[in-house]
Image: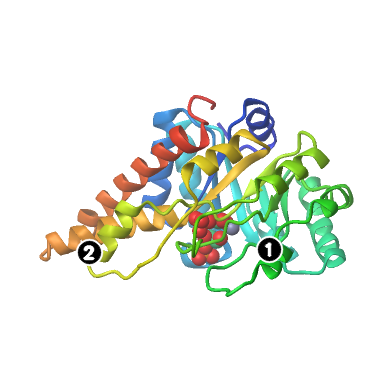
Amino acid sequence: MPLVTTTEMFKKAYEGGYAIGAFNVNNMEIIQGITEAAKAENAPLILQVSAGARKYANHTYLVKLVEAALEETDLPIALHLDHGDTFELCKSCIDGGFTSVMIDGSHLPFEENIKLTKQVVDYAHDHGVVVEGELGRLAGIEDAVNVSEEDARFTDPDEVEEFVERTGVDSLAIAIGTSHGAFKFKGEPKLRFDILEEISKRLPGFPIVLHGASSVPQEYVEIVNKYGGDMPGAKGVPEDMLRKAASMAVCKINIDSDLRLAMTATIRKFMAENPGAFDPRQYLGPARDAIRTIVRHKIVNVLGCNNKA
Ligand code: G3H
Ligand code: 13P
Ligand code: ZN
């Protein structure tokens, strides 16, 4: 099966009350771990590539690895640019075979975000590619924000209709309290489901995207800390909150940090227990297994997209 866009996936996910996992890929083992999990669970999949991943692994290598995964799995897979920040980057990915791009103008003033996003949408749609835009900014745990500053970062429901209408985007990433990385909450985790609810009322049937959705499993944090790592206080989004979001208008859930954590914990433990190991396959193999295990868990217990391929 060739690469697909997210249009059909999102339509079914919205109607079915589940979400598609969008997992970041950087190398062969990560792609294999994710796609083997999706195959085992018969799940549709979004593989996403950041500018950093593209720089690290090279556009062509990543596309060819994803093509290999398509051939091996025969699943509906979309290849997506994560956090594109310029028209040129989005164009390069569209010209280079991606079926979906994100243009992240969330740091720009509203009118500039609309202008940049629309420029990408016009080019993408001419080439059969779909576009994710973003409104609102995800907070970083390092920011010592008070409540009103924090509020200012959430997506404003009053802006979403105009943004979607004027840009023509196919999906919209919103900020309701998640953040990137492994340190998401200082205190109790809290997501603004009231904002999500309000946005979905303003955009009936329209697919919403949740970034920063790693749960940061404590068993992996403990392994990292035990074997020389340093992640005290690492905390993610509780899985029941993600399940709730998936049952609402959220059709795409972005997960990267949990895969990094699973991989790193596994390699740290392996190297500590096997100090003589020097064949990369000895530790990259178990790391790939750990990715497969965590992605299967996400598909079945968090996203609910098993058997939806
Ligand atoms: O949201 C960003 C993703 O986790 C990708 O991270 O830019 O380090 O590849 P990266
Ligand atoms: P996490 O850091 O929570 O995995 O979020 C990943 C993400 O949003 C990629 O765009
Ligand atoms: Zn993100």
Q: Which residue is mark 2?
A: 226
Question: Residue at position x 85%, y 52% from top?
Answer: 158
Question: Closest to the observer: 114 or 301?
Answer: 301
- Coordinates of residue 292 in the picture (x, y in percent): 36, 42
Residue bearing the label numbered 1: 137
Q: Residues within 10 Å of mark 1 (few under 14, many from 20)?
A: many
Within the image, what quadrant is residue 150 found in? Answer: bottom right
Instruction: Identify the secondary structure beneath mark 2.
Output: helix
Out of 36 and 70, give the one closest to the viewer: 36
Residue at image location 76% in from the left, 33% down from the top: 205
Question: Which numbered marker is on residue 79?
Answer: none
Q: CA distance from mark 2 to mark 1?
A: 34 Å
Q: Is residue 297 visible?
A: yes
In which quadrant of this rendering is ligand 3 seen? Answer: bottom right
Percent of width and height locating residue 212: 55, 56
Specify the amino acid type for callout 1: Arg
Viewport quadrant of the C terminus? top right
| Image spot of residue 214 (x, y percent) | 48, 52
Q: Earlier in the sequence, mark 2 or mark 1?
A: 1
90 horizontally vs 41: left or right: right
Question: In this image, 43 relative to 200: left or right?
Answer: left
- Residue 279 visible, this angle: no
Task: Indicate the position of residue 247 as horizontal and vertical percent values.
Answer: 61, 33
The residue that appears at 76% across and 38% down in the rendered structure is: 206
Judged left or right of residue 225, residue 233 is right
Q: Nearest the camera: 72 or 205? A: 205
- For the N terminus, the quadrant is top right
Q: Nearer the viewer, residue 243 or 47?
A: 243
Q: Residue at x 59, y 53 (%)?
A: 211
Q: Is residue 250 above or below residue 81?
A: above
Q: Judging from the image, what secondary structure is the residue with disc 1 in?
A: loop
